[in-house]
C-alpha cells in the first residue's frame, strides 16, 4: 500500500544495512522525484526507522529491515545491489569515497559479481575492491581486507598479467599481506605463486618474497625462509654465504667498526635520508631476513645487522636504520 517511491526508498535503505546515512541514501536513487527528507519522515512516523545520530538512521527492528529488503524480487536482487552501488559511485565525490561511501559501494556492487558484467565493469569493480582492501588493511580489518582483495582478484581477466598488469600486481601484493595477517595460509599459498611466476621484474616480486618469508617463518619452516632470504639478497647485490663462519663475521664487524670510528654522532645524525629505491629494497629485505636468521643462524644474523649499519652509513638513513644501530649496539 506504500507509494512506489517510498518502497524504493525502503528497498535501498535495506541494502545499506542496519544503519544508514541520509546523504548516502539520497545518492542511491535516480528518480528526481524522490525526496529523502519526506521519505525519512514517513519512515519515522510509521515506526520503521529512527534517528540514531546527526543524519544517521537505523531500523527499529531487524525484521522491519528484512521486510523492506523482501520488497526486492529475489530474481532482481543482484542487479538491484549492483545498480545501487553504481549510482552511489557516480554521485559521490572523491572525499566522500575516502570517508563514507566506498564500503557501501563495494559491498553492494560485489553482490552483483555473478551478473554478466563486461570487461570494463569487472576492471572497475576490481579496482574498487583494491581500494576497500587497502583501507581495511590500514585499519587492521584483515579478514574483511582478504575478502575484498580475493573478490578483486576473481574479477581479473585471464590475461590480466599482460593487459591489467598494474592492477593485478597491486591486488596480489595487498592480498598476500591480508591473507598472511589474517592467518589464511591456504589462500596465501595458492596466491603467492602468481606474482612470483608472472611479475615482469624482480623488483615487483619483492613484496611477495617479503610476505613469503613471513609465512614460512610463521609456518615453522625457518630453514626454507632463510634460504629464500639469502637467495633474494644475492639478487639484490647483498650476497651472504649460507655457510658463513665466525671469520666472515669478524671481517664484516671490523669494517663497520672502522666506519663508525671515523664518524662522530653528529656526523651520523646528519646523514641524508635514504632515497635510492634499490638501496631501500636492500635494507627492507635485510630487515625481513633478521627474523628468520635469528633462530636459524646467529652468524648470519650478526652479518645482516652489520650490512644494515654499513648500508645506512654509506647511503643514508631509513626508518629501519634505527633498528640496525640498536641491534648493533646490543
Image: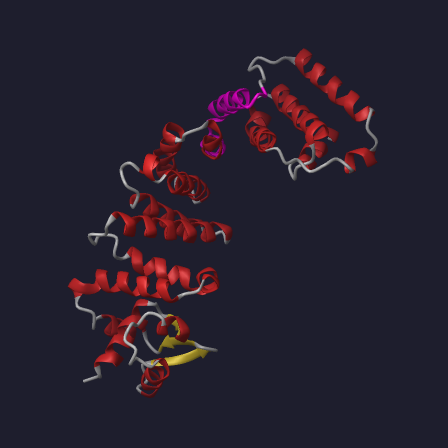
Q: Is residue 75 left or right of residue 285?
A: left
For residue 132, above or below residue 14: above
Q: Nearer the viewer, residue 325 or 296?
A: 325
Q: Is residue 132 above or below residue 3?
A: above
**Left or right: 42 as drawn, with respect to 229:** left
Vertical relation: 187 (above or below) 197:
below
Quadrant (top left/top right/bottom left/bottom right) for the N terminus? bottom left
> In the shown orientation, is residue 227 left or right of residue 101?
right
Q: Position of residue 197 (x, y in %)?
A: 37, 28
| Residue at image coords 59%, 32% | 287
Q: Main secondary structure of the magenta part?
A: helix
Residue visible at 66% across and 37% down in the picture: 318
Please determine whether, in this image, residue 262 is positioned above or below residue 2. above
Measured from the top left, where is residue 252 in percent x and y? 70, 18
Q: Quadrant of residue 62?
A: bottom left
Image point 61% across, 33% down: which residue? Answer: 276
Chain part drawn in magenta: 210-238
Whether 88 is among the magenta residues is no
Front residue of 207 and 230: 207
Quadrant of the image containing the C terminus? top right
Asked where in the image residue 236 lies, by quadrant, the reply is top right
The furthest residue to the bottom? 45
Q: Find residue 172 and report its horizontal and vertical position in percent.
A: 40, 39
Total count of labels: 0
Amino acid at each position: 500500500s506504500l507509494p512506489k517511491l517510498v518502497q524504493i526508498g525502503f528497498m535501498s535503505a535495506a541494502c545499506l544495512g542496519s544503519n544508514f546515512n541520509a546523504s548516502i541514501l539520497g545518492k542511491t536513487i535516480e528518480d528526481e522525484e524522490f525526496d529523502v527528507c519526506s521519505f525519512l519522515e514517513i519512515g519515522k512516523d510509521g515506526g520503521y526507522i529512527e534517528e540514531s545520530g546527526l543524519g544517521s538512521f537505523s531500523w527499529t527492528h531487524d525484521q522491519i529491515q528484512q521486510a523492506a529488503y523482501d520488497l526486492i524480487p529475489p530474481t532482481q536482487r543482484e542487479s538491484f545491489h549492483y545498480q545501487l552501488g553504481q549510482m552511489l559511485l557516480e554521485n559521490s565525490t572523491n572525499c566522500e569515497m575516502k570517508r563514507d561511501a566506498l564500503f557501501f559501494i563495494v559491498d553492494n556492487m560485489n553482490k552483483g559479481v555473478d551478473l554478466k558484467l563486461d570487461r570494463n565493469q569487472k576492471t572497475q569493480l576490481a579496482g574498487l575492491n583494491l581500494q576497500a582492501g587497502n583501507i581495511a588493511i590500514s585499519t587492521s580489518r584483515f579478514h574483511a581486507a582478504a575478502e575484498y582483495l580475493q573478490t578483486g582478484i576473481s574479477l581479473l581477466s585471464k590475461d590480466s598479467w599482460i593487459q591489467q598488469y598494474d592492477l593485478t600486481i597491486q591486488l596480489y601484493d595487498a592480498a598476500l599481506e591480508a591473507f598472511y595477517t589474517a592467518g589464511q595460509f591456504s589462500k596465501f599459498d595458492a596466491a603467492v605463486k602468481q606474482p612470483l611466476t608472472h611479475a615482469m621484474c624482480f623488483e615487483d616480486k619483492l613484496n611477495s618474497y617479503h610476505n613469503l618469508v613471513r609465512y614460512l617463518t610463521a609456518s615453522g619452516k625457518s630453514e626454507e625462509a632463510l634460504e629464500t632470504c639469502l637467495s633474494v639478497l644475492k639478487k639484490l647485490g647483498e650476497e651472504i654465504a649460507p655457510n658463513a663462519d665466525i671469520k666472515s663475521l669478524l671481517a664484516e664487524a671490523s669494517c663497520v667498526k672502522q666506519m663508525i670510528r671515523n664518524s662522530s654522532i653528529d656526523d651520523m645524525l646528519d646523514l641524508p635520508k635514504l632515497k635510492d629505491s634499490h638501496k631501500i629494497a636492500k635494507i627492507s629485505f635485510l630487515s625481513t631476513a633478521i627474523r628468520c636468521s635469528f633462530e636459524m643462524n646467529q652468524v648470519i644474523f650478526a652479518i645482516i645487522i652489520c650490512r644494515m649499519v654499513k648500508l645506512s652509513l654509506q647511503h643514508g638513513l631509513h626508518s629501519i636504520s634505527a633498528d640496525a644501530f640498536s641491534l648493533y649496539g646490543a
